[in-house]
Image: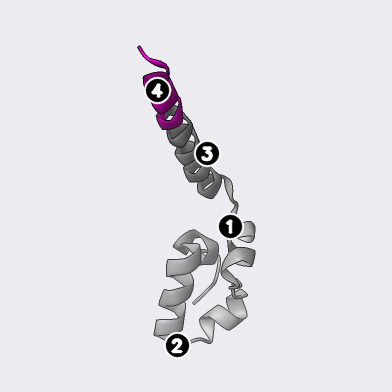
Amino acid sequence: MSLNDQGFNQSILNLKLMKKSVLKLGKTLEKKEQQLINGGYIFTCERFCSSSNSVREDQIRRYGADVFEGCGC
């Protein structure tokens, strides 16, 4: 294998490692951290229950239904 081939193979390996690292970053963020990045916030149960259906659906889409399971609405 020539030096050019070795350099090319090393570059490909580096790109794959970088891609894996970047993809892994998004998976390690917790909901609170994602919330800060997205600029959103999770409603309290009181606010969630007094909101329109479309706003509720948006909150569920953003943060998951499990966040609002304890709300009595």
| Contact, mark 4 vs mark 1 (Cβ under 8 Å) | no
Question: Horizontal and vertical percent for residue 73?
Answer: 49, 77
Q: Residue at x 50, y 64 (%)?
A: 63
| Contact, mark 3 vs mark 2 (Cβ under 8 Å) | no
* Element under disc 4: helix
In the displayed structure image, the side of residue 49 where residue 13 appears, left or right: left
Give the mark, 1 or 2, whose residue is nearer the N terminus: 1
* Element under disc 3: helix
Mark nearest the camera among 4 and 1 is 4
- Return the residue at label 3: 21
- Measure the alpha-carbon separation of dots 3 and 2: 40 Å
Kind of residue at disc 3: Ser
Mark nearest the camera among 3 and 2 is 3
Question: Horizontal and vertical percent for residue 44?
Answer: 62, 75
- Measure the alpha-carbon separation of dots 4 and 3: 26 Å
Mark nearest the camera among 4 and 3 is 4
Residue range in magenta is 1-12
Question: Horizontal and vertical percent for residue 42?
Answer: 59, 71
| Contact, mark 4 vs mark 2 (Cβ under 8 Å) | no
